[in-house]
Amino acid sequence: MNPLMGPVSELAKRRFDRKCKRAASGSKHFATARIAVGVLVTLVLIFICLGAEVVRETVITNTAEQKAQAEDGGQSLADENPDYAGWLTVEGTSISTPVVSCRQGDSKGFYLNHGFDRTPSFSGCPYIAEGSSPTSSNMLIYGHNMGIGSLAFSELQNCYRTDCFSSIGTVTFKDKDGRTSRYTPLYGLKVPMSYDVLLRFDFAGKSDFDAWLNTLSDCASEKSDFGGTDSVITLVTCASALGGAKYRSVLVCKNIAH
């Protein structure tokens, strides 16, 4: 016993030493746990990146083959999948993809997680909204935001911002019967997913259609000269690649002379 310390002080010192040892041990365990978590997160990120790259390369390969079929008239694509509606190309982006129509009896949003061949797919396949069609005054097409380069509609995530909106050129849609329509960007919007103004596809007349466009214009953060049009193509994707995104990025493009 330390002669300068009483028994109580000596006992307190021992207790303090034990607490310090436990704290040191706990710190080591905490540090080890942090390292383990860090390694796990790194491995998961590597796995995701590698998986995404495999998906991207597969999609690019498949799309290149499908594009050749589309340029050849598209009949082979229609034979492969009767839902084939046409081919979409967006100048200024890597978007060049088949587009499908909803099939009666499919679950809602079937093509969000199924590819053109109707098998489960990470990136899905762009599809025309139920109730819309290539002949509608408003042809609305949904596509995933994968957050990965050129997959699906990822490049349209920021279409409501000046830099992205101004970089987009002519949007071309060649339907399954070979008819080609061309469009130019009119509005870029970011709206809540519940914004159902978009879900109007046919109109009573020109004044009704123009009034609808004016409603969209009021919500648009990016606009080009209107100049009049009789139809639009509307491309919609999530404003964020994170699951459960509550907002949608919307690119409305007006039909121009063929």
Image (cartoon, helix red, strand yellow):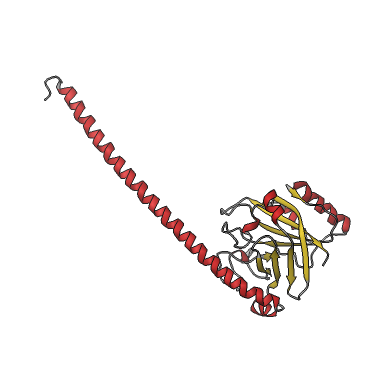
User: The C terminus is located in which quarter?
Assistant: bottom right
Residue 46 rendering spot, x and y as whole percentages: 45, 58
- Left or right of 242? Residue 134 is right
User: The N terminus is located in which quarter?
Assistant: top left
Q: How many marks?
A: 0
Residue 188 rendering spot, x and y as whole percentages: 72, 52
Residue 233 at least partly seen = yes
Tell me where residue 185 sits by quadrant.
bottom right
Residue 155 rendering spot, x and y as whole percentages: 63, 57
Residue lying at 70% horizontally and 76% vertically, measured from the top left: 71
Residue 131 at least partly seen = no
Residue lying at 14% horizontally and 19% vertically, measured from the top left: 4
Residue 31 rendering spot, x and y as whole percentages: 33, 44
Residue lying at 84% horizontally and 56% vertically, measured from the top left: 209
Q: Is residue 13 above or below residue 192?
A: above
Q: Nearer the viewer, residue 73 or 101?
A: 73
- Left or right of 4? Residue 171 is right
Residue lying at 18% horizontally and 23% vertically, measured from the top left: 8
Q: Nearer the viewer, residue 192 or 96?
A: 96
